[in-house]
Image (cartoon, rainbow, N blue to C red):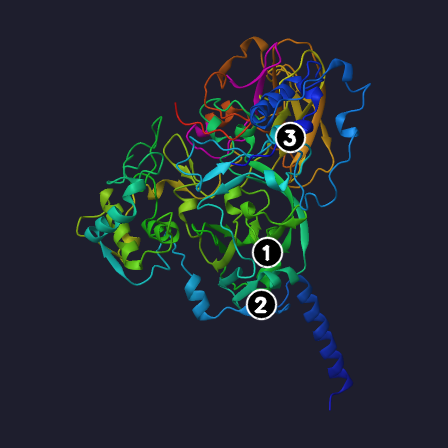
């Protein structure tokens, strides 16, 4: 049925195809595991994209509702008004501080994208019981925290349409391409500086910040 | 907290005696630490000069030791109980979202023992049942896949030695010399032999769609820690690993499965890896916007600064390992770079006026810790000891002053500056910065 000529062509095609496979295998070459079903994917597919909110689910939440959820779930660590308890992160404040000696990066002063806040609360909070809040409650908390930061009005309703439109103060101050290397040191070998000019500008001696490095673990707390 | 049982007969008498050899100071510190335990456990064995060994046989030479499988897994000698990961309790709000540091001052060579590899958790260390752990790969792929650990172990395996460094390593010294310790100034770098499967193999198996440019990688921990990675890096040298230095990953390092992103900041090396999703744009997750971005003096921030620039540090002498009088010493240290291999390390003992090339020790591997040494005859006078690495891209490790000139002192991450140790005439060593 096949001529010898077409057989040769067929072999040539197989050889070519095999050559291609050596560089990039066809999907399913190994055949291990199982194809993930839509239901399996839906269960784990939690990520939300910061820039455009892609991945935000249905649901909504108000600032008022967020205030209630916050008092119950968040205030113990983050403070009643987001001021932070102890060393737990502040959620508000620091606006205009980023060029200061002691900057305060918070949701209000630093975060570039509002949907990231929804994603992070949904992904990781509350720390002792993550993944226990409903989508509505996560929206409500997001609305409340944005409102604490004066980023949205008191009647704001957070949902998949409204969150990507919230203009975050620091949004345009990120450079997303790495400018390094940004130092151009030369490997000088001798007489590189004047020995007389060398001065110790700071020392860790006597600062009393370093836990011990022998014996049992240290429980050192701020002095 | 972990206490090792201390038995008086396990304490070498020469460590508590007055004639300790080189490194006496360290031994004395160890002796002091042991005394605390001995107060509870019994009286220390007082060395009787008449029974000194030699000429006498040592006590452990006069009895039979423990049999095989006395310790079926094994553990360090009881007298090494101080060589442990340590944390800075005042640094973080809770131990579950915190860091611990490797005791570099007590390590030798380029491989970090598994129990001493530094830790960084965002929601504590999960204890995962490998029989139930799965890796999902989906998004812009031809054939979304769910893999069990058994499935992953069947793929072609690869072993590579790579360092992992938290980009905040040295962060506490951005503003000034603060931590008087090698462990706490540099201990968030460790190095291991990793075994697993190339991420490119898994991505070929699912089939990458044409529009895919980024991958979102996510952990199974309580924080579902996630980061965005460019697809090119995923296809270049990333590994999905299940083993560390020959045994299964430790829970603290991501058991049963983690990502290794050679040469890039520790945070992207997702532990407890459960999901990889391909997309056309980055995700800008909390860990790559609010954190792991570098604040500059003008108020702008740099994002996606993944690369670990070349860095080196002298591990002996250091604050934990002072000198014991004038004489001949071997300066020892470690160097590493995310840009490939270390080409050269120079050492200065005069605060950077003059430098001398140190000897690099084999193996010199790409994106791995590299050991260097230099003999040094210390005359007992004050010294300022420092090392400077040059990597194969030609990049030269900068001074802290050069870094601050570019980035100020609020950028927290990526402090890869030259570390200067001040050696005082009594041999004590301090962390200093030079103007």
As rendered, which of A174 and B348 lies closer to the eye? B348
Residue at 50% across, 68% down: A36
Tell me the element at label 3: loop
Tell me the CA gap for discs 1 and 2: 15 Å
Which chain is home to disc 1? B
Tell me residue B101's x, y (percent).
54, 34
Q: Which residue lies furthest to the left in this view?
A: A155
Residue B207 occupies quadrant: bottom right
Q: Do labels 2 and 3 share a chain?
A: no
Residue A172 occupies quadrant: top left
Q: What stretch is highlighted in magenta?
A: B406-435
The secondary structure that most of the magenta stretch takes on is loop
Residue at 75% across, 13% down: B49
Cβ atoms under marks 3 and 1 closer than 8 Å: no
Cβ atoms under marks 1 and 2 closer than 8 Å: no
Which chain is home to disc 2? A
Pointer 3: what residue?
A: B7
């Amino acid at each position: 049925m096949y001529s010898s000529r077409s057989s040769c062509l067929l072999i040539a095609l197989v050889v070519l195809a095999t050559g291609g496979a050596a560089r990039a295998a066809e999907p399913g070459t190994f055949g291990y595991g199982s194809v993930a079903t839509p239901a399996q994917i839906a269960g784990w597919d939690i990520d939300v994209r910061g820039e455009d909110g892609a991945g935000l689910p249905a649901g909504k939440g108000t600032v008022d509702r967020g205030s209630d959820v916050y008092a119950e779930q968040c205030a113990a660590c983050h403070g009643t008004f987001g001021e932070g308890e102890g060393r737990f992160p502040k959620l508000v404040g620091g606006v205009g501080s980023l060029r200061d000696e002691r900057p305060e990066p918070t949701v209000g002063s630093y975060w570039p994208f509002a949907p990231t806040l929804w994603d992070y609360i949904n992904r990781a909070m509350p720390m002792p019981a993550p993944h226990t809040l409903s989508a509505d409650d996560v929206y409500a908390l997001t609305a409340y925290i944005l409102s604490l930061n004066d980023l949205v009005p008191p009647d704001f309703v957070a949902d998949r349409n409204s969150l990507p439109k919230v203009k975050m103060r620091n949004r345009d101050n990120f450079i997303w391409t790495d400018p390094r290397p940004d130092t151009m040191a030369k490997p000088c070998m001798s007489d590189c500086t004047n020995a007389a000019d060398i001065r110790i500008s700071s020392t860790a001696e006597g600062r009393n910040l370093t836990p011990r490095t022998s014996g049992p673990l240290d429980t050192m707390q701020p002095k | 907290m972990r206490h090792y049982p201390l038995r008086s007969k396990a304490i070498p008498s020469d460590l508590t005696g007055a004639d300790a050899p080189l490194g006496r100071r360290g031994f004395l510190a160890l002796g002091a630490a042991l005394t605390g335990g001995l107060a509870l456990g019994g009286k220390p064995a007082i060395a009787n000069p008449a029974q000194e060994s030699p000429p006498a046989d040592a006590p452990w030479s006069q009895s039979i030791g423990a049999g095989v499988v006395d310790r079926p897994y094994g553990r360090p000698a009881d007298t090494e109980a101080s060589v442990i990961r340590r944390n800075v309790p005042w640094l973080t709000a809770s131990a579950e979202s915190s860091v611990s540091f490797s005791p570099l001052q007590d390590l030798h060579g380029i491989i970090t023992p598994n129990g001493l590899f530094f830790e960084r958790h965002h929601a504590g260390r999960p204890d995962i049942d490998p029989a139930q752990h799965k890796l999902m790969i989906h998004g812009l792929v031809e054939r979304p896949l769910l893999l069990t650990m058994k499935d992953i172990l069947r793929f072609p395996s690869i072993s590579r030695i790579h360092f992992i460094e938290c980009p905040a390593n040295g962060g506490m010294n951005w503003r000034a010399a603060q931590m008087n310790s090698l462990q706490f100034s540099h201990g968030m770098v460790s190095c291991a032999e990793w075994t697993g499967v190339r991420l490119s193999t898994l991505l070929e198996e699912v089939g990458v769609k044409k529009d895919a440019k980024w991958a979102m990688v996510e952990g199974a921990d309580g924080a579902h820690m996630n980061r965005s990675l460019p697809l090119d890096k995923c296809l270049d040298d990333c590994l999905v690993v299940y083993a560390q230095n020959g045994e299964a990953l430790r829970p603290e390092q991501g058991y049963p499965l983690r990502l290794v992103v050679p040469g890039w900041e520790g945070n992207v090396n997702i532990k407890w890896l459960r999901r990889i999703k391909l997309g056309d744009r980055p995700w800008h997750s909390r860990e790559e916007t609010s954190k792991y971005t570098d604040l500059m003096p003008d108020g702008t921030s740099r994002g996606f600064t993944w690369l670990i620039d070349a860095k080196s540090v002298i591990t002996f002498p250091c604050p934990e390992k002072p000198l014991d009088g004038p004489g001949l010493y071997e300066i020892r240290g470690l160097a590493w770079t995310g840009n490939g291999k270390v080409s050269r390390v120079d050492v200065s003992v005069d605060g950077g006026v003059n430098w001398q090339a140190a000897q690099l020790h084999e193996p010199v591997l790409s994106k791995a810790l590299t050991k260097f040494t230099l003999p040094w005859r210390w005359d007992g006078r004050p010294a300022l000891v420092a090392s400077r690495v040059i990597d194969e891209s030609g990049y030269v490790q900068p001074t802290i002053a050069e870094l601050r000139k570019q980035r100020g002192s609020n950028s927290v991450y990526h402090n890869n500056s030259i570390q200067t140790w001040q050696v005082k005439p009594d041999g004590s060593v301090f962390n200093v910065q030079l103007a």
